[in-house]
Image: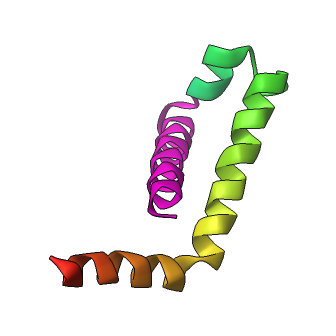
Amino acid sequence: MKILDVIVAVLLVIGGLNWGLVGLFQFDLVATIFGGQSALLSRLIYIVVGVCALYQAIQWKAIQRRWAAKIEEK
């Protein structure tokens, strides 16, 4: 599960950076790379990032427990 936690965190950072670019410069990097906002691959990336956000929100306490247990083991 910790690998999934890391993957989710990385995708959320990427999504957050993309939103930052949209807010600051009206530049959507995902859309630029993958052929526009309505392109299938762009939409898939938006969906995956959204699912990651839901996972992070729902699993927040469990993630904290997993990582706290790892720190205590050291």
Q: At 48% from the left edge and 43% from the top edge, which residue is drawn?
A: 20
The answer, for residue 28, to whether it is visible in the render is no
Magenta-drawn stretch, dominant element (helix, strand or loop): helix
5 or 73, which is in the foreground? 73
Q: Is residue 33 left or right of residue 4?
A: right
Region in magenta: 1-28
Q: How many marks?
A: 0
In the depicted structure, whether residue 61 falls above or below residue 9: below
Reply yes or no: does residue 11 show up in magenta. Answer: yes
Q: Nearer the viewer, residue 51 or 39?
A: 51
Task: Give the x, y percent position of residue 1.
Answer: 52, 64
Question: Which residue is painted at 63% across and 17% down in the image?
Answer: 32
Identify whether 41 is placed above or below 1.
above
Q: Position of residue 8 (x, y in %)?
A: 53, 54
Is residue 63 at least partly visible in the picture?
Answer: yes
Q: Residue at x 74, y 28 (%)?
A: 42
Residue at the extreme left: 74
Quarter of the figure with residue 68: bottom left
Is 14 magenta? The answer is yes
Q: Quadrant of residue 56?
A: bottom right
Locate the C terminus by quadrant: bottom left
Q: Is residue 52 left or right of 11 when viewed as pictured?
A: right
Give the x, y percent position of residue 73: 21, 80
User: Nearest the camera: 24 or 16?
Assistant: 16
Q: Position of residue 55 (x, y in %)?
A: 65, 66
